[in-house]
Image: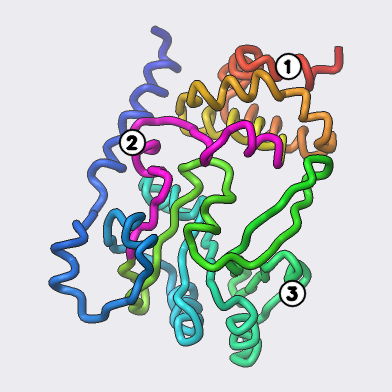
């Protein structure tokens, strides 16, 4: 075994330790201590796995407090994944049900809100320190299987919003229940066992891998990139879908394909080449 391989194995073991040693509070025990209760739907109760504590930057804490006066905020997506993996630096993405009311409220409070993508139910909040936080409304997405631009509609629950996402490790949310100046306590919403896949080291599609790829073929390269980045394995059903549908990448612009490949090769060129070959993706993206 080469020195590089030994380093990568040690790195993966350290990441696994971070996940397993993370501070989780079982639901029953935490409910006895909660000073504030949040009403949840039966669907949410079935997808809540743990209550947890998350340290956050003060400017994000203030934003969450202001949002919570209008609608319950959720931390979503890659920020939850990276937090659970013990990473120190991660972007914050926030989702809310009452999107229009939240946007109006933030503007009335003087926040710097960019509404360019509001038709997609997303706004960007820029802070004086230059940091940017996305605030999005729960939404569903409908694709025509020709372009990669979905038709967006409001969703009623966080579970509906999470179900449109690509991979289980990106389909988790933290419902914000209590906020201090630099810390929040909330519930981990995990309807597709993303935490389990983090612990197992697996990249798995949310529900049907064929459907996820047909919606947006760029997810093929995202799956490979996440596998390279985290040293994870790709779920066999997802790999079968990639091998069958890599030709759909022709629907994706050359610029977006190049961006994903550059990100992947900057992490680990050898592993990137191996996955591109084993997945048959090279048959579509290579210029020969």
Distance from disc 2 to disc 1, alpha carbons, whole Å, reads: 29 Å
Helix, strand or loop for disc 3: loop
- 48 over 213 or under it: above or below: below
Distance from disc 1 to disc 3, alpha carbons, whole Å, reads: 39 Å
Res. 132 visible in picture: no
Helix, strand or loop for disc 1: helix
User: Do callouts 1 and 3 mark residues in contact (Cβ within 8 Å)?
Assistant: no
What segment carries the magenta color? Answer: 187-215
Residue at position x 44%, y 82% in the image: 65
Residue at position x 46%, y 24% in the image: 233
Distance from disc 2 to disc 3, alpha carbons, whole Å, reads: 37 Å
- Read off the residue under disc 3: 115
Helix, strand or loop for disc 2: helix
Quarter that holds the C terminus: top right
Residue 197 in the magenta stretch? The answer is yes
Residue 13 in the magenta stretch? The answer is no
- Read off the residue under disc 2: 199
Q: Which mark is residue 282?
A: 1
């Amino acid at each position: 075994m080469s020195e590089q391989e030994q380093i990568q194995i040690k790195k993966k073991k350290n990441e696994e330790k971070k996940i397993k040693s993370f501070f989780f509070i079982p639901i029953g025990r935490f409910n006895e201590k909660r000073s504030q209760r949040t009403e949840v739907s039966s669907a949410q109760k079935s997808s809540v796995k743990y209550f947890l504590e998350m340290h956050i930057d003060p400017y994000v804490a203030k934003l969450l407090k202001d949002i919570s006066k209008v609608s319950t905020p959720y931390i979503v997506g890659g920020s939850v994944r990276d937090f659970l993996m013990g990473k120190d630096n991660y972007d914050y993405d926030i989702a809310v049900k009452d999107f229009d009311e939240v946007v109006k409220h933030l503007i009335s409070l003087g926040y710097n809100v960019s509404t360019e993508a509001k038709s997609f139910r997303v706004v960007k909040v820029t802070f004086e320190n230059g940091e940017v936080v996305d605030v999005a409304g729960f939404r569903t997405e409908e694709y025509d299987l020709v372009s990669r631009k979905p038709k967006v509609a409001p969703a009623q629950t966080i579970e509906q919003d999470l179900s449109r996402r690509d991979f289980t490790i990106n389909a988790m949310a933290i419902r914000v229940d209590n906020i201090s100046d630099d810390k929040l306590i909330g519930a981990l919403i995990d309807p597709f066992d993303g935490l389990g896949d983090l612990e197992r080291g697996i990249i798995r599609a949310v529900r049907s891998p064929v459907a996820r790829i047909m919606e947006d073929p760029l997810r093929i390269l995202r799956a490979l990139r996440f596998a390279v980045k985290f040293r994870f394995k790709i779920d066999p059903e997802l790999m079968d879908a990639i091998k069958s549908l890599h030709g759909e990448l022709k629907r994706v612009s050359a610029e977006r394909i190049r961006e994903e490949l550059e990100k992947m090769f900057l992490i680990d060129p050898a592993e990137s080449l191996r996955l591109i070959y084993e997945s048959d993706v090279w048959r579509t993206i290579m210029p020969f």
